[in-house]
Image (spheres, coloured by chain):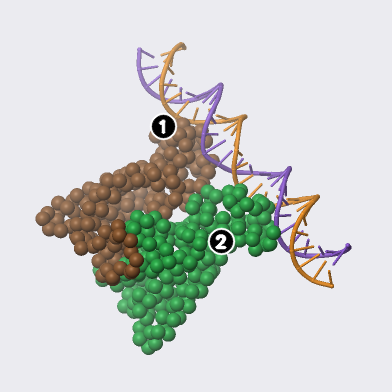
Chain colours: A brown, B green, C purple, D orange
Amino acid sequence: MAQSDTKTKILDAAERLFAQKGFDAVSLRNIVEAAKVNLAAVHYHFGSKQALLHAVVSRRLRPVNEERLSMLAEARAKAGKRKLKLEAVLESLFAPVFRAQANHKSGDSFTRLIGRVVFDRNAELQKFMVGELAQVIIQFSRAFDEALPGLDKTEMDWRSHFMAGAMAHTLCNADLLASFTGTDAGAEGYEATVQRLVEFTAAGFRAKVSTPPKKQKSS
Amino acid sequence: MAQSDTKTKILDAAERLFAQKGFDAVSLRNIVEAAKVNLAAVHYHFGSKQALLHAVVSRRLRPVNEERLSMLAEARAKAGKRKLKLEAVLESLFAPVFRAQANHKSGDSFTRLIGRVVFDRNAELQKFMVGELAQVIIQFSRAFDEALPGLDKTEMDWRSHFMAGAMAHTLCNADLLASFTGTDAGAEGYEATVQRLVEFTAAGFRAKVSTPPKKQKSS
DNA sequence: GCTTAAATCAAACGGCTGTTTTAAACGGTC
DNA sequence: GACCGTTTAAAACAGCCGTTTGATTTAAGC
């Protein structure tokens, strides 16, 4: 059996199962049974269960992040001397991940897994994610600052956090939402999802900032 | 040893550990060690690990939901014949949970756990949560409809979902966010958090709805 | 103080876990 | 076909898991 087959089978099965039940609730035996491979193959190819998780996440997330950065660069080129549009920044952030799901026959496992990652407190995974997301965080932070030049840093941090939650929750439940609202979860439905998310979050970012409450520490 | 002490010790330890690492990654032996009680006590008092999780969640969430409904009723009484204010509805939903955390010496375990619940795909827990949240969902759905009479049902569903994500992510990370942004996570800090969240989500709910994309299924 | 119920305890049950080990099979090259 | 590196396979290791069991202790009521 060719290497790529076994390895890919494991990654596919792990992606599906981790997305469904979470890392800790899925054993290697569950995965190899679903993948129809031998238990020792996991250690041979990936080294450990934790490393398998990283591999599962990064094989999907890296191309997504590359596309995010690429879309952002295009948005910059398009804006030229004018200010970056907030909607373009948000779309650059959201569209690649939702589009990747629509283009994968694995269905919603991918988005669900990526959405779960945002909330996962597995310390090893978070450490790993810092590396994976470093460039995205740097570039998009700049872009948000440019698109929203008047927004205070503290407000920016909070609102970015709200936005991340809205995005991740949607990633986790794209399948449920689509069926519940009778919208199309397929190739064209992701565009509607992205558009809705952009509208909601853009408005949130632009919301009027009320006066800060008392006793705020200096940052 | 008095019953309430052992039971409470288990609940406190479980709450902290489940919040930190998640249900599946925490064993009963971890919990009883942290609680300094005997392993069999879990089954004596709660019946199973799953039932313990339900108990942990509901002991905090029930009072929160009661307060939510109470605050909402007050907002209705205050509005009288006028339309319910969206901000009041949102605040009724968010403030009780953030306030409960501020009032508990358990610190952020409580909010983190409640936030995690929103994203947890543990089927038993989700079934349990349907019962716990039934009244809140009914009453707040009505309230949102009243406060946003022009918003299409599909858009309402999507935006409610984005809002839930933003709230849950904030609950999961209230500790990190507060320290990162240099804001006070204590008794007065929660009000600022709630205010920020209300501003962001209210603006999102009120965002202009663009024309729906093609090929939308009829609901 | 006695009886009964409640609560706690330690050990065990039956099963599962990630990881390791060693041998065999496979595939490519000469 | 022999050799070598890669890959797969089965078994085992050492440990952990949730749950159960039966004995003992504690608390409550009379």
Q: Can residue B125 be seen here?
A: yes
Relative image position of residue A149 (x, y in whole percent): 19, 60
Label 2 crowd bin: few (<14), some (14–19), many (20+), radius 10 Å:
many
Question: Looking at the rendering, in which quadrant would you find the N terminus of chain B?
Answer: bottom right
As drawn, B125 above or below C12: below
Relative image position of residue A95 (x, y in whole percent): 28, 55
Observer-nearest of A149 and A211: A211
Question: Looking at the rendering, in which quadrant would you find the C terminus of chain B?
Answer: bottom left
Residue positioned 43% across, 39% down in the render: A51
SS type, badge 2: helix
Q: Mark 2 points at which residue?
A: B56
> Is B58 situated left or right of A68 in this image?
right
Residue positioned 39% across, 55% down in the render: B176
Residue positioned 14% across, 51% down in the render: A77
Q: Name the residue under label 1.
A: A3
- Comparing labels 2 and 1, the label whose residue is closer to the camera: 2
> Is B38 situated left or right of C28 in this image?
right
As drawn, D27 above or below A67: below
Relative image position of residue B55 (x, y in whole percent): 58, 62
Q: Which chain carries label 1?
A: A
How far apart marks 2 and 1 lie (CA) works out to 46 Å
